Image: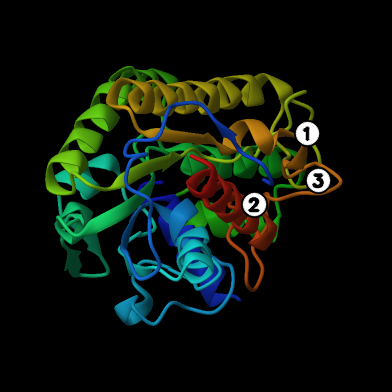
Amino acid sequence: MKVTQASRILAAAAGAAMVGATLIAGPSNAASPIQPGASYVALGSSYAAGAGVGPADPTDTGALCGRTLIAYPNLVAKALDLKITNVTCGGATTDNITTSPQNIRNHSINPQMEAVTREARLVTVTIGGNDVNYVGNLIAESCLADLATNPSSPTANMVKQYGACTPQSEQTVRNVLAQMEGKLSTMIKQIQAKAPLARIVLVDYPTVLPQNGQPCSLIPISGDRQKFLLEVARELSLSTKHAAQATGSDYIAASKDSRHHDACSKDPWMTGYMFAPRSAPMHPKETGHAAMAEAIIRQLATS
């Protein structure tokens, strides 16, 4: 999500307050098993940082990035006894990984790629959602639907106050989506050049919206508007999958295996349009992070 829109809502929410993912591409370095104590670098956006779930990660100085200890990178590192360098950050785009500093509350955060060294043996990445304003649009569309039903809605009016009730245009999103596979492939190649012995695992975005496109209390978006947002989610996942295949990296399809755990499901791994303590709207819950971590751990052990 863009720093100027929905990330502010996540900050406000914080203040107010996938078992068996599918592997598609082959391992990037199957010949080099990852040993306890090995160097692990975690890259990505708020879906990797763990926005809203669990205790704050002490490496997140000033809580600028919203990293938490229950996020899947920290779960993987703990389970496998790896030495983690976690530079995931809420609001990050692919450019914030590769070339562009990320500006948060008058602080400049170096491109995440700087944390990748030749010593790395594992690199995980979840990125791309903020490039297409995915969560920002989910929140904005929910805000509009909420206002249409209840103009005095406290939640919708708070979102509106922060300027996050206006979706980014469909054409703008489609234009960025058309470039995503190339940008992700370039990013992976840069990681491979800096860490030639590392296993690189791309974890895509778990599913927020119900596949039937039917609104629920946590997803008030109309079926017509959900159709476009579901298309964006599918295209983002495909871009991630194809980039992994093109570079020989691992791809874990959290999007596929969380389909029956969307925000409207009986067993949700995702939050919906809600602003509450220990929660970030439209983000993985603790169960979602546990599922993604388990998928990574199992894959590393079996290939």
Residue drawn at (32%, 27%), measured in percent from left and top? 248
Number of callouts in the render?
A: 3
In-image side of 263 versus 13 (left or right): right
Give the labeled residue for mark 1.
215
Q: Secondary structure at mark 1?
A: loop
Work out whether 202 lies above or below 120.
above
| Label 3 or label 2, whichever comes before in sequence order | 3
Give the labeled residue for mark 2.
291
How dense is the environment of label 1, judged by Cα within 10 Å: few (below 14), some, or many (20 and up)? Answer: some
In-image side of 135 versus 206 (left or right): left
How dense is the environment of label 2, judged by Cα within 10 Å: few (below 14), some, or many (20 and up)? Answer: many
Front residue of this view, candidates 117 and 267: 117
Q: CA distance from mark 3 to mark 1?
A: 7 Å
Amino acid beneath label 1: Pro
Q: CA distance from mark 1 to mark 2?
A: 25 Å
Residue 183 seen = yes
Amino acid beneath label 3: Ser
Amino acid beneath label 2: Ala
Circles 3, 2 touching at the beta carbon (< 8 Å): no
Q: Position of residue 212 (x, y in %)?
A: 77, 23
Front residue of this view, candidates 43 and 164: 43
Residue drawn at (69%, 46%), measured in percent from left and top? 19
Front residue of this view, candidates 47 and 42: 42
Front residue of this view, candidates 100 and 155: 100
Structure colour scheme: rainbow
| Label 1 or label 2, whichever comes before in sequence order | 1
Circles 1, 2 touching at the beta carbon (< 8 Å): no
Residue 162 seen = no
Mark linked to residue 217: 3
Work out whether 277 lies above or below 127.
below
In-image side of 300 versus 16 (left or right): left
